[in-house]
Amino acid sequence: MIKSALEKAEILVEALPYIKEFSGKRVVIKYGGAAMQDCGLKQKVMQDIVLMKYVGMHPIVVHGGGPDINDMLKRLDIKSSFIDGLRVTDQETMEIVEMVLGGKVNKEIVTGLNASGGKAIGISGKDGGLLEAQAIDDTGKMGFVGEVCHVNPQIIETLIDNGYIPVIAPIGIDNEQQSYNINADLVAAALAVALKADKLVLLTDVPGLLQDPKDLESLISILKVSQVSDYVANGTISGGMIPKVKCCVEAVTGGVGRTHIIDGRVPHSILLEIFTDEGVGTMVINE
């Protein structure tokens, strides 16, 4: 019992410098992957985010929801197709995407955070003109898949100032009031820059960037922006890791202090990355 209590005390002491450093700072968290689908992991992520809020940090959550969208489209017998990993989104699909992300998924996360002792409010990029969007593809092949062209963070500032944890569905809108389905990683990076966040954390289903994908011990703990082009050229950064690293690079070159790609399958991975010396993923820095 005494040993266990001492171990807990030592953990708190190790975390103290990080709590002091990041108190009052903003951290944008892109929430997705297995951490959203596994009930046990989901609860731990909620606890991590609420703990961050209670120790003085300001977490902002951006979420995906691909599996839930797939499930609803299947139930409605609407077929999906993808180009370069992005869902082709016609008007019918866009309506389903908005319903699932802005309704079901968003409110489930809000409910989980509130149940863990936090105060969360869920919005989409359409609320308060948060995310102005445009089509990502001029040819129309992608339909209503969008990219962020402007962020108006006022509504997020208001929520933070009043003690709430903002939970954001990645849906934007253009001047014609057309909705767009936007990749959650892109939204998280754009928000992190606009909010002058100190950290951007991407929860993924991989340990981070690996030198050798077959060797879990080959984790690259620190990735410099200056190394990215070489790693892309030699194939170290490939596939689904390319857009994630690209988002991290855009964030740190846009003024975000640090960005992290971490394994959301590891329980309490957010706390391990932020509050311990070792960390559990790849940190991208602007060097």
Image (cartoon, rainbow, N blue to C red):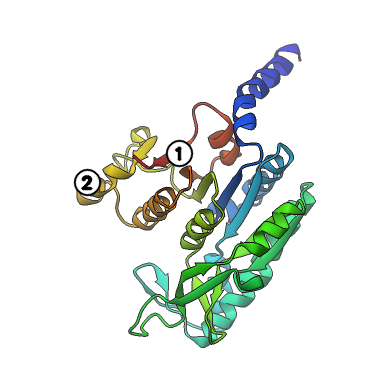
Q: Which amino acid does label 2 sit on?
A: Asp
- The crowding category of the residue bearing disc 1, from other C-alpha atoms within 10 Å (few below 14, some 14 to 19, many at least 20), is many
In percent of width and height, residue 234 lies at: 20, 47
* Depth check, front residue: 232 or 92: 232
| Marks 1 and 2, how far apart at CA | 20 Å
Is 158 located above or below residue 11 in the figure? below
Ranked by sequence position, the earlier of labels 1 and 2 is 2
Q: Where is residue 155 in the image (x, y as percent from the top left)?
A: 67, 64
Residue 260 picture location, percent across and down: 47, 43
Question: Which structural element holds mark 2?
Answer: helix
Is residue 200 toward the left or the right of residue 37 in the image? Answer: left
Q: What element carries label 1?
A: strand
Q: Is residue 200 left or right of residue 283?
A: right
Badge 2 density bin: few <14, some 14–19, many ≥20, Cα 10 Å = few
Q: What residue do we see at 56% from left, 36% from top? A: 274
Q: Which mark is residue 230?
A: 2
Left or right of residue 266, residue 154 in this image: right
Residue, disc 1: 281
